[in-house]
Image (cartoon, grey):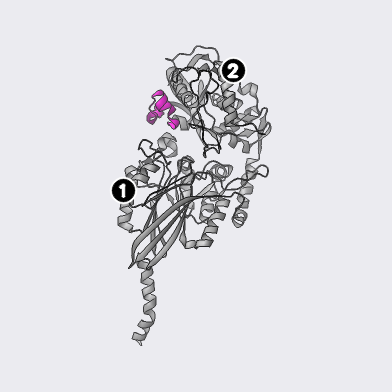
Amino acid sequence: MKRNFLLMILPLLMLLFSGCGGPRDGKYTFRILTTNDVHGCYFDSVYVGDRTKNSLLAVSYLVDSVRAATGGENVVLIDAGDCLQGDNAAYYFNYVDTVTPHLYGRMADYMKYDAVAVGNHDIETGHPVYDRLDREMKTPLLAANAIADASGKPYFQDYVILKRHGVKIAVLGFTNPNMKNWLSYSLWSGMKFESLIPLVQNDVDRVIEKEKPHLVIVAAHAGTGNGDGTQLENQGMDLFRSLKGVDFLICAHDHRPFVAQNDSICLINSGSHCRNVGSGTVTLEFVDGKCVSKTLEAGLIPVHKEKVDAEMKEVFFPDYEAVKEFTLRPVGELKVPLRTRDAYAGMSDYINLLHAVSLSVPEARLSLAAPLTFNGYVRPGTLLYNDLFTVYPFENQLYVVRMTGKEVIDCLEYSYAAWVNTVKGRGDEHILRIVNEPDPRTGQKRWSFVGRSYNFDSAGGLVYDVDVTKPAGSRITVKSLADGAPFSEDAEYNVAMTSYRASGGGGILREGAGIDTDSIDSRIVARYPEIRELVYDYLQEHGSIDPAVIGSPELIGEWHFIPEAIADRLMDKDMRLMFPPRK
């Protein structure tokens, strides 16, 4: 009897133990689907009117279609960071409704993400937000190079092991190592961020030795870069060219869709804002319990914004309604249209507003500000809170930093060097530093900036000229302070700027003026809340945005590109190239 019983259950036991020990012999194909730099694009609506946009709802539709075609167990879904900032919905669940479980966590769990790496803009939300999300969501947040000061171990989870058909898949996650040049220490207190090289390889070796995975995936919130080892925040190609034992490397951060592949590893960067889903395909063959062959492929799948997961949209519709109600509140009046692109051609109402708000704090004598929305438009009339996300899309704080007059000039020289060329007045010249190439970061189809426009700082509180016929480094002539008082290179001034700039963002302080931004705390004389909130406070106090007030020369001063006869003509030509008139 016992013998017969054992014969009956032996096949079941063999099946059970084979499942525990590893995959059965044969071929297994998995799809690796990736997103990154979602930047709050949770919903397909822009909240005003009937325009739609790319969203996680559309990503979910695409992912589900792949799962239906290949089997859910054969799909691995990973995000490489920057999920918590950039849209009304992210802001609302970051700072307004802090009781309801965070919307992003619930959406990630609903979509069955297997892992999410932490991005610099996720850290930008501050400890209360990302610590809360880490507690709430089932999907693991990964950042192996964010090292806790107290323990010397990763602050977030460092990796996760997935098992599919007995195949072990290791997913290691890393955040951007250049955090101190993006954010103030208060946002990432208690941590330090290590370079991805050699840390990633060391971690991969450790996980391989401990877990014996059959497939290794690294998700790093780092830009693709050029692979020459010089860019701390863009180490993607450095990793691609050096990593051993990694099958897929998922990159992010620079918003540039990119795919690379060699015999042993694929790099995937899907871009940003749910425009594409990265797609990797791997087929493994097992013989006698061992993987004897592995083939890899990688590419990008465009996301169609109109094809959304209807069931998911219905599930999260109450959240959408709550966000919409909050952000459609009237907050004041706009007496002039705001076009953010006007900032590239000279003084503009948009940048005047940022200078006026920055200079409204009592400590500030001067200000530095740049256009943070590439090509936004806010129509005159009643302003909604929603419009403030066009005016100021990021959660940067306002800092007031002590600087010498020479350091201010050096910063401006550095900024304009990235912004404009030296010209002689010929018709074939470009005054703006532009190239005839598309830019997926901004959506430009043809002409685009060489540099990043959010680093094109101008100064408020000064009267100065920028001579575009002179070489970079010798263009700025300061005539006076805004109130007519003399300006001195040797004097010290309190300069209002974003926390991003004060922390070293864009290199303007460090490379332009030689300021050690690692020690910026010794120069900070005041800290204020997020600049968007300061714009809101300005509206509550003044009731409106009036160009005569925000553009008052006694407050913000004035500046010009000179000689005007040359600069105006070439600027008009370049602005038409960048932003062609509608037919």
Q: CA distance from mark 1 to mark 2?
A: 57 Å
Q: Is residue 413 left or right of residue 343?
A: left
Query: Which three-letter amino acid code belongs to the residue tagged 2?
Result: Pro
Vertical placement of residue 339 versus 68, above or below:
above
Q: Classify the position of the C terminus by image quarter.
A: top right
What x and y, as percent, mark residue 391?
59, 33
Label 2 belongs to which residue? 553
Asked if the magenta segment contains residue 511, the reply would be yes
CB under 8 Å between callouts 1 and 2?
no
What x and y, as percent, mark residue 5?
37, 84
Part of the protein shown in magenta = 504-522
Q: Residues within 10 Å of mark 2 (few under 14, many from 20)?
A: many
Asked if the magenta segment contains residue 22, the reply would be no
Task: Tell me the residue at 49%/32% (across/down).
Answer: 452
Assign a secondary structure to mark 2.
helix
Task: Tell me the residue at 39%/57% (across/down).
Answer: 295
Assign a secondary structure to mark 1.
helix
N-term mark: 1 or 2:
1
Vertical placement of residue 447 versus 224, above or below:
above
Of marks 1 and 2, the one in the foreground: 1
Label 1 belongs to which residue? 202
What x and y, as percent, mark residue 363?
50, 23
Task: Tell me the residue at 64%/24% (across/down).
Answer: 547
Q: Residues within 10 Å of mark 1 (few under 14, many from 20)?
A: few
Identify which residue, 304 or 477, lies in the foreground.
Answer: 304
Magenta span main SS:
helix
User: Which image quadrant for residue 50?
Assistant: top right
User: Which image quadrant for residue 170?
Assistant: bottom left
Query: Which three-letter amino acid code belongs to the residue tagged 1?
Result: Asn
Q: Classify the position of the N terminus by image quarter.
A: bottom left
